[in-house]
Amino acid sequence: MNENSKSYSGFKRFIGIVCFAIFGMVGSFQQGQEFNVLNLLFGMLVGLVFGWFSMLILAILLKWINPGLKKTQKKGFARRAVSAGMVFMVPFALMAFMAAYFLHWKSAGLFISAAISTAAVATGAEISRLYEKPRLWNNIVPSIVATGCSMAWLFLIVQIQSIPATIIGLYSLATTFLNLAP
Amino acid sequence: MTANLKTTHAKSPFPWRAVFIMMINPNVVLKKMVGRIPWPFSLAISALAFMLFFMQTGLDLMRIGLKGSGFVVLLSVEGLLFGSLGIALLAMIAWGITRVFKGNKPLGWAISAFGLGYCSTLIFTILGMFFSLLLNWNTSVAFGVSGVLWATGPMIASIKEMSRDNTALSVIVATICSGLLLLGWALLGNA
């Protein structure tokens, strides 16, 4: 498969999305509740949405700061660069999964910060390859986005762990009230 | 193998310059400088980084009264061995796999690139030691783990360079190496 082909780029994007789903699953990890289906599904969903949103923001910003490439490159160059960069999260996703489910480490959530930063740097490098002389902004902007995403993830990770329990609690409360109602 | 190792022993006037550039832009170092840096120098960086990281793990456990000072020394020695022999072994595995897929870098280059990848870990762990010893903070996770994770990026870049820019192969090899690194770290770091 050609590294620049559309299907290969789609495959890379799929791999990146799977990595985010794994990070979400790891984020939902709680001692003693490793295989709680609701937690896992909710974590994966949050990871997928977070990943899709992060990739979208990065692609929009890269397109915005590289107006010259719109004329010289095929449509979707920024999205292809982001997809290529996201593939580099695979080693981190594996380590995070192993750390949470085999080694039972509590700090497995740390892995995503390093993963996003590495993927962002790789994305910057992919865009730089399209120029004869690399532009500094293509390294700075992905790093800023990565920092923002890491901070957002640290906030989300707390929510991932508490929301499923809150939903169950609210559901129990609602059914109790309904049963008590005359 | 000996011939491969000798190729990287050419004199380099500023190996420390590479240390700092490796943290900012590893691709520049990998393309232009690694071949001129002696591999023992690079391994000394990873050895020192892991020694400080494992030492901080021991210090954290000692601070909460779970372990004594002898354990800290033992863990530091394990870190030193893991950062030198372990990282060299990891580089050999990556070199061997990429060689099968027509990789063209010598073994000394691979060891040197892997060792230099831990420059950022070294800086993280030096800062961690500062906070651990002077402010009594528990630093093994915040500085040690973060530092080791940050080294994965340069490792992927090294493997990509070794595999002649083959992204798929570099990601697969990096995933294998990361898994092995994590297992080794879990076995030794939690001794």
Image: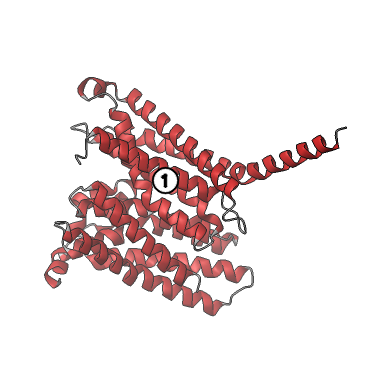
Residue B174: % across, % down: 31, 55
Residue at the spot 29% in from the left edge and 69% down from the top edge: B89
Check the image and name the residue furthest to the bottom: B70
Label 1 CA crowd tier, 10 Å (few <14, some 14–19, many 20+): many
Residue at the spot 56% in from the left edge and 42% down from the top edge: A42
- Whether residue A11 appears in this view of the structure is yes
Q: Name the quarter where the N terminus of chain A is drawn.
A: top left
Q: Amino acid at mark 1?
A: Cys
Residue at the spot 30% in from the left edge and 65% down from the top edge: B90
Q: Name the quarter where the C terminus of chain A is drawn.
A: top right
Residue A128: % across, % down: 25, 35
- Residue pointed to by mark 1: A19
- When asked about the image quadrant of residue B2, the answer is bottom left
State left or right for residue B40 relative to residue B152.
left
Chain letter, disc 1 residue: A
Considering the numbered disc 1 on the image, is that residue within a helix, a strand or a loop?
Answer: helix
Residue B91: % across, % down: 27, 64
- When asked about the image quadrant of residue A157, the answer is top right
State left or right for residue B59 relative to residue B38.
right
- Above or below residue A164? Residue A67 is above
